[in-house]
Image (tube, rainbow, N blue to C red):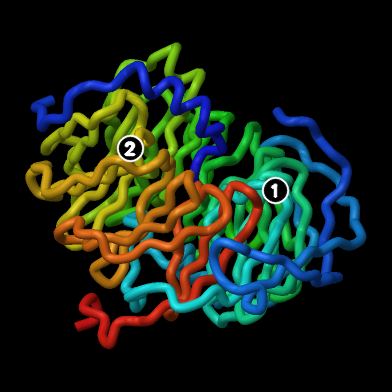
Amino acid sequence: MRNFIKTSLIAVACTGILVSCDLIDTGIDQGDQEIKTQEQSAESFQLDDILSPDNLGQIVGSGGSEPEQEGESGTSTVLKKMSVQDAQILSSNGYMDGTDLGRSNASNTVGLQNVEDLIWNFDAGTEIASTPIKTPNDSGVLFGDISGKFYSLNIDTGEINWEFQAKGPISTTPAISGNVVVFGSRDQNLYVLDTESGDLLWKFNAGGWIESSPVINEGIIYFGSYDGNLYALDILDGEIKWSYDAESVIAASPSIGDGIIYFISDAGILWALDLYTGRAKWNFKMYSESPVLSEVVTETSAPIVLFGSVYASGLDGIVYAIDGRTGQEQWAYQGNTLLSLNLSAADGMVYLVELAGSVTSLDAGTGAKVWVLEGFSAYNDPVFICDGQVYFGTTDGTIHTVSAKTGEKNWEFKVLSGINTYPSVYDGVLYVGSSDGHVYALKGASADSNPLQQ
């Protein structure tokens, strides 16, 4: 879900371009192997500064390979046909990562009052840039890493269920529909796997890197590519339903609301297309493309859809609220940086994260600042919101939680290395990946009741 970037490089660019904060009016190398592995082994691992060694474990997997033929750009290669039953299941919306189609990064799951224990941690051996998500039937925790491996881990033990090898880094957050998981890679392929076996069902070769996390709606997969196209593919076999050429890199993930799909191109344009035909309804120019900044960082935040409004940001550091039907600006807010901001939204609030180390809450209706927290180490992903709490990690390895309404600090928990994906929370367990390759499953003390479900 986030664009794969070196945080240190962006931080250098960020330090020289800070401005005041106010409300305003305005083709990668083609390899030759794809590997699916079901063999795993375990060895001890000690996390000295967190918990006792008795509570910790490291799981490492390896296995054989199965080469596949590469298809031409813009074509799908089907390796395993789906059953009629699969087709019926896949006609529903995607489970994604517990959030809605509007990419609000908010969930109605029960939150954590604090962290009681570390259930398990898994060492992939390389940076995790993909937010771990859980299958609906609890069969696995799924994520990818920058070596191109995609994993399914046992939800209780962290042992490998299976792994799959792509030919390029995976920084997209996967989407799930039924027993199918979908993710993209820098090898230009969108992959569709069976969640239970890890079998490759089909893949689609786009004309550029895929760092746009897919979204699934009514059996159609939507995602953008560095080739400038937004694609709509049939989840059964990868048939192109439609594509739209934005004539600029699409690195950010698309969002859906009220029959419209929204996405941001690297030219600084927010696009609104008809979900079913791909026909453009309107576009909104957020900024004039900066040749300096665009070489350092591209869009990392998906547009957020909430109650008929779309919230988006670009490389000018401005958050825009735009009418989802007409494309008319409702309000704009200038952040502290000229780099793009990462957005989340819930309960009438918009939350923005700035790489320089601050989290700000805005009133979704007016754009007025409600609270701001500063002084954190750098962070480059949106916050996750559930049960009245805001969750985020920072590059010093700390997971923070604050009150969604007031910004008051609740609890924090430190792991070995920097956090560069947003955490996900399911059934009283928090999952998060780190820059040193670990994925942590943290057991929380759950709240007695969930106010979002009352």
In the rendering, at what x and y percent does residue 294 appear?
A: 46, 20
Secondary structure state at the residue bearing disc 1: loop
> Foreground residue, 200 or 428?
428
CB under 8 Å between callouts 2 and 1? no
Q: What residue does disc 2 label?
A: 354
Calculate the distance from the C-alpha at mark 2 to the C-alpha at mark 1: 25 Å
Q: Is residue 242 visible?
A: no
Q: From the viewer's perspective, is 67 left or right of 51?
A: right
Residue occupying the point 10% across, 28% down: 24
Task: Count neighbours of disc 2 (C-alpha within 10 A) and say few if under 14, some if 14 to 19, many if 20 or more.
Answer: many
Position above or below: 357 against 267: below
Residue occupying the point 45% across, 64% down: 424
In the rendering, at what x and y percent does residue 11 appear?
A: 44, 27
In the rendering, at what x and y percent does residue 19 appear?
A: 22, 21
Q: What residue does disc 1 label?
A: 126
> Foreground residue, 134 or 196?
134
Position above or below: 26 against 76: above
Residue found at the very far bottom of the displayed protein: 448
Q: From the viewer's perspective, is 418 left or right of 69?
A: left
Residue occupying the point 76% across, 37% down: 72
Secondary structure state at the residue bearing disc 2: strand
Quadrant location of the C terminus? bottom left
Q: From the viewer's perspective, is 135 left or right of 345?
A: right
Residue found at the very far top of the displayed protein: 291
Task: Count neighbours of disc 1 (C-alpha within 10 A) and say few if under 14, some if 14 to 19, many if 20 or more.
Answer: some
Residue occupying the point 18% across, 62% down: 347
> Foreground residue, 378 or 145?
378
Q: Mark 2 belongs to which amino acid?
A: Glu
Q: Is residue 432 visible?
A: yes
